[in-house]
Image: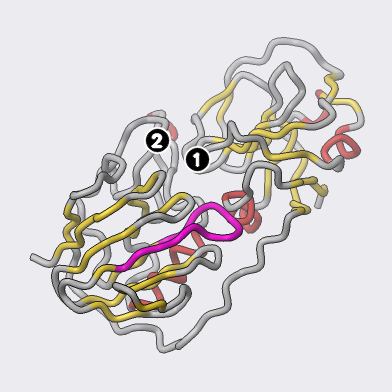
């Protein structure tokens, strides 16, 4: 069996694919790669289907050893990548021989890098996905040093692009949103969401927590729990919004002022603490 050995995990390394949507009625969030476009790109570069499982590495530090020849690609933010002592760079397909080690340094911007491997990570799926859900504890355990991950059969050839330009990660994000469903529970909501907010260190895969001028409620009534979508901007009593990401709870009891358009979720997933964010109704 082809396996990939984890030499070092870095701060946090998780197996992720494109998640397990469709189980909210069971209380199971979608989970999956927070920067899904980065995982899709990595899989294309190594010849995998876009939904194959890879490794999501928070702030680099990941090192893996190949036990059999394989093709790998690192995507997400620009990050130094080495094979043994040779610098190979990110966003390109790289061939590993058995016994070679690939290591990621810390990215200079952004948070989450993705390692795709030819054949994909072939752990047993749970509810149709190999993703780790950190809120519910579903899916593969967070990776540890010394763990061996099985690889699936190679089904395709690398995409053929020699180099792909890494996406730019601006220090300030303007994020389009759709207002509602509880936008009428706030005063001056468009102006409030349009202020500059700051990403706080309490952010994680569940949600992006923001600091700034609190949103003001026009309606202070209690709200029964209702369903939540990925990208929902929920406003607790503090008035400081939380943008729910892939491991979000499936219901919540605070009003949702707006929902982030799906195309901007990847940029929010890469927003480090201190990043400025404002929302634009679209």
Residue 141, x across and y down, in percent: 27, 40
The mark total stands at: 2
| Secondary structure of the residue carrying numbered label 1 | loop
What residue did someone put label 1 on? Answer: 205
Residue 10, x across and y down, in percent: 38, 49
Left or right of 21? Residue 149 is left
Residue in front for this viewpoint, 274 or 196: 274
Residue 151 included in the magenta stretch of the image: no
Write down the quadrant of residue 231 in the picture.
Answer: top right
Write down the quadrant of residue 242 in the picture.
Answer: top right
Left or right of 79? Residue 130 is left
Query: Reading the chain from its start, which is encountered first: label 1 or label 2?
Result: 2
Q: Is residue 92 above or below residue 20?
A: below
State how far apart marks 1 and 2 are (Cα).
Answer: 7 Å
What residue did someone put label 2 on? Answer: 134
| Secondary structure of the residue carrying numbered label 2 | loop
Residue 139, x across and y down, in percent: 29, 41
Label pair 1/2, CB-CB below 8 angstroms = yes
């Amino acid at each position: 069996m082809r396996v990939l050995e984890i030499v070092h995990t870095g701060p946090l390394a998780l197996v992720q694919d494109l998640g397990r949507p469709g189980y909210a009625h069971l209380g199971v969030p979608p989970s999956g790669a927070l920067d899904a476009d980065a995982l899709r790109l990595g899989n294309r570069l190594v010849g995998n289907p876009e939904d194959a499982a890879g490794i999501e590495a928070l702030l680099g530090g990941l090192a893996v050893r190949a036990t059999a020849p394989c093709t790998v690609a690192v995507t997400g933010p620009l990050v130094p990548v080495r094979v043994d002592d040779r610098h190979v760079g990110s966003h390109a397909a790289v061939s590993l021989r058995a016994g070679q080690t690939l290591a990621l340094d810390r990215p200079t911007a952004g948070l989450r890098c993705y390692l795709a491997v030819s054949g994909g990570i072939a752990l047993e799926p749970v509810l149709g996905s190999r993703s780790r859900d950190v809120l519910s504890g579903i899916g593969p355990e967070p990776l540890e040093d010394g763990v061996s991950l099985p690889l699936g059969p190679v089904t395709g050839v690398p995409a053929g692009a020699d180099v792909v330009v890494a996406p730019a990660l601006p220090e300030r994000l303007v994020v389009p949103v759709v207002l509602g469903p509880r936008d009428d529970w706030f005063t001056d909501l468009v102006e409030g969401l349009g202020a500059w907010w700051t990403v706080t260190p309490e952010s994680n895969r569940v949600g992006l927590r923001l600091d700034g001028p609190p949103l003001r409620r026009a309606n202070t009534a209690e709200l029964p729990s209702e369903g939540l979508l990925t990208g929902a901007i929920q406003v607790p009593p503090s008035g400081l919004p939380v943008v729910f990401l892939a491991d979000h709870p499936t219901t919540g009891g605070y009003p949702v002022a707006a929902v982030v358009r799906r195309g901007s979720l990847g940029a929010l997933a890469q927003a480090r603490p201190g990043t400025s964010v404002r929302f634009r109704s679209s």
